[in-house]
Amino acid sequence: MTATSPVAVCPPLSLYIHVPWCVRKCPYCDFNSHAIRGDIPEAAYLQAILEDLEPDLAYLRGRPIETVFIGGGTPSLMTGNFYQQLFTALRQRMDFSHNAEITLEANPGTLEAGRFESFREAGINRLSIGVQSFNPEHLKTLGRIHNAQAAHEAIEAARAAGFDNFNIDLMHGLPGQTPEQAIGDLREALSHNPAHLSWYQLTIEPNTEFFSRPPPLPDDDRLWAIYQQGSEFLHAAGFTDYEVSAWSRPGRESRHNLNYWLFGDYLALGAGAHGKVSLEDGRIIRYWKTRQPDAYLNRIGSRTSGTEAIEPEDRALEFMMNALRLKQGADEQLFSERTGLPLSTVAVQLGSLRKQGLLTPHRIQATEQGQRYLNSLLEQFL
């Protein structure tokens, strides 16, 4: 076992909150999401989250919350009043950084569009809008409940409510998709001047409808053409791909996701939420919450259903798997700060990869060639 020391500098602390309900489960979705049956029990869920938080306050270690991400499910189905009460209660129990980034996932649809102003009043200052495509046929294939017009209207409603910092989620590599159609989706998205785009390839995940009945996906040549032409289009529009599937305008990167990718800490609240924290005794742990919404609501006290230590021999790989997804990589010093391991733990691998031209000389950063062979590069840390 590799020797470790307690993490000398406490990593930045984020907060992930999961809202598990949605209108309808999409055929590609493997997230913890459950179709609504009746009314969402907002008051009971708020109470459950606050009870769940109490034992986790020990993980704060004097740190403020730097970022919050509310994911789902469809968190925008909850009312502005729910979030007003939630953040009032959270701020009574923990400190927030003065410039905390607070993101809410929102899906297009008239039900949520009118709520954007109340979300902003509750303290939410960033939206991630799940469009996925503007193409009618692709929206139908993906099982989305909105059409292109509803997507455009939702984005404009968000802007009208004062959200200038928002992300648009788009997929590529969709069944039957051509490069021209993929560029069309990007062009439609950029017409709204977003600060950020998540542009990621559709993958078929276990325990989904698509896994049971796989749709015909584009072949590798077409997938590459879509990615290459889409990347050229986004670069020409002033976006930078700072991560494999994340594109932003300068200074508008997702701070929450950057904390994930740089092995920061994050608390977890809500049904099925996962967290990761560094403890004073040098251990780094992951923990997760009760997954089923009814079970989460009915438990008393902590809803943590499992905990596991990230062993020293696994920390190097986990750090590299995340940091090397970033175009900027990470400072070498950050490796020791976040993992509690000396840099010498990975010195042999770093030296070998630099000789092969896959890593830059003085950072944990893949070269352009290294980015093309990222999976092979990461195998060096197994």
Image (cartoon, helix red, strand yellow):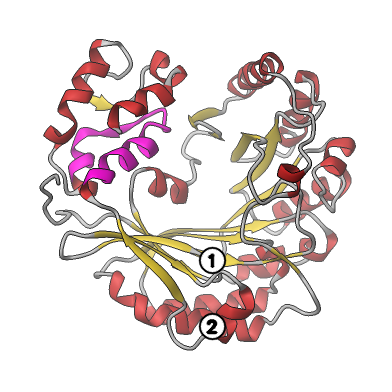
**Closer to the camera, 193 or 330?**
330
Q: Earlier in the sequence, mark 1 or mark 2?
A: 2
Residue 272 - label: 1
Query: Residue visible at 37% across and 29% down?
Result: 328
Q: Quadrant of residue 2?
A: top left
What percent of the width, then of the height, locates residue 331? 25, 34
Q: Secondary structure at mark 2?
A: helix
What percent of the width, then of the height, locates residue 285? 30, 60
Dominant secondary structure, magenta: helix
Query: Residue visible at 31% across and 38% down?
Result: 317
Query: Residue visible at 48% across and 70% down?
Result: 289
Identify the residue at the far top of this view: 356
Q: Amino acid at mark 2?
A: Ala
What percent of the width, then of the height, locates residue 280? 17, 65
Left or right: 320 in relation to 221: left
Residue 48 - label: 2
Query: Residue visible at 59% across and 40% down?
Result: 195
Residue 227 - label: none
Cβ–Cβ under 8 Å for marks 1 and 2 = no
Whether residue 24 can be seen here: yes
What percent of the width, then of the height, locates residue 262? 34, 43
Q: Residues within 10 Å of mark 1 (few under 14, many from 20)?
A: many
Left or right: 275 in relation to 145: left
Magenta span of residues:
313-336
Left or right: 10 in relation to 12: left
- Real-space Cα distance between discs 1 and 2? 13 Å
Q: Secondary structure at mark 1?
A: loop
Give yes or no for residue 315 being in the magenta stretch.
yes
**Closer to the camera, 270 or 258?**
270
Give yes or no for residue 242 being in the magenta stretch.
no
Whether residue 15 can be seen here: no
**Closer to the camera, 233 or 210?**
210
